[in-house]
């Protein structure tokens, strides 16, 4: 892998592959019912949740990389390399794995109306509210704020610079965001 972008593409590809692995199970579940047992129920929920968090956190890391490359261009190579090669494991994959603990604990099968379902069964509604809040906060708000902040700073930096190449970069950045 030569560039930082290639490294992030690899991480994003792994995250997307995890999602693709779960699709046949969800398809059978939606059409018929859950026929794969309790262990695979937990495994599929685990894999799905790792994908959910890892893919959105990788997008936030890509934004941080772009921020470093554009705003701190002269001295960003070392921090960018560290971000892409080391910190991505602690900032993306470790949280994605830790946030699956509720899936391991609460995902199970149950018979409902003569059909088996695979879902998370929480002991109280407050648990459901807590985990939905976690999904929104870690899966949407936190990465969204990072992405928004990085690209706002990038746009500000590029809009104050002169030269044809800088204007072209600004135009490309705005198009990518929109």
Image (cartoon, rainbow, N blue to C red):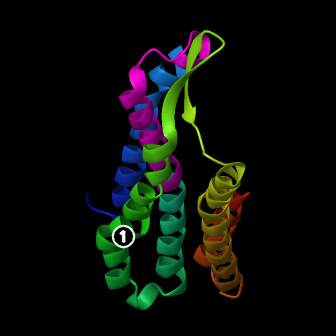
28 shown above or below 96: above
Tell me where residue 104 appears, x and y as whole percent: 42, 45
Tell me where residue 47 appears, x and y as whole percent: 42, 41
Judged left or right of residue 13, residue 143 is: right
Q: Which quadrant: the N terminus?
A: bottom left
* Res 162 quadrant in image: bottom right
Judged left or right of residue 59, residue 101 is: left
54 shown above or below 169: above
In the depicted view, which residue is nearer to us: 160 or 82? 82
* Res 159 quadrant in image: bottom right
Callout 1 secondary element: helix
Q: Is residue 125 found inside the magenta-colored segment of the image?
A: no
The answer to whether residue 142 of the structure is visible from this angle is: yes
Residue that protrudes farthest toward the front in the picture: 123
Q: Residue at x 51, y 18 (%)?
A: 34
* Res 116 quadrant in image: top right
Q: Which residue is mark 1?
A: 90
The answer to whether residue 100 of the structure is visible from this angle is: no
24 shown above or below 172: above
Q: Residue at x 62, y 69 (%)?
A: 142
Tell me where residue 19 appears, x and y as whole percent: 46, 37
Judged left or right of residue 75, residue 146 is: right
Q: Magenta residues: mostly which secondary structure?
A: helix
Q: Which quadrant: the C terminus?
A: bottom right
User: How many numbered markers are drawn?
Assistant: 1
Q: Few, some or many C-alpha atoms within 10 Å of disc 1 (few <14, some 14-19, many ≥20)? A: few
The magenta-colored residue range is: 29-54
Q: Residue at x 69, y 60 (%)?
A: 177
In the depicted view, which residue is nearer to us: 161 or 60? 60
Q: Residue at x 40, y 22 (%)?
A: 37
Q: Is residue 43 found inside the magenta-colored segment of the image?
A: yes
């Amino acid at each position: 892998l030569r560039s930082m972008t290639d490294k992030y593409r690899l991480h994003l590809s792994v995250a997307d592959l995890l999602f693709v692995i779960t699709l046949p199970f969800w398809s059978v579940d939606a059409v018929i019912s859950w026929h794969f047992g309790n262990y695979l129920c937990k495994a599929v929920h685990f894999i799905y949740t790792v994908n959910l968090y890892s893919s959105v956190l990788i997008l936030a890391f890509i934004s941080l990389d772009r921020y470093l490359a554009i705003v701190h261009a002269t001295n960003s190579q070392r921090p960018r390399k560290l971000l892409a090669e080391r910190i991505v494991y602690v900032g993306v994959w470790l949280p994605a794995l830790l946030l699956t603990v509720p899936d391991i604990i609460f995902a199970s099968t149950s018979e409902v109306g003569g059909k088996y379902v695979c879902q998370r069964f929480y002991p109280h509604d407050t648990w459901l509210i807590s985990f939905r809040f976690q999904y929104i906060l870690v899966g949407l708000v936190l990465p969204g704020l990072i992405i928004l902040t990085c690209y706002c700073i990038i746009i500000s930096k590029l809009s104050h610079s002169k030269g044809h190449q800088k204007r072209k970069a600004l135009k490309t950045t705005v198009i990518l965001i929109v």
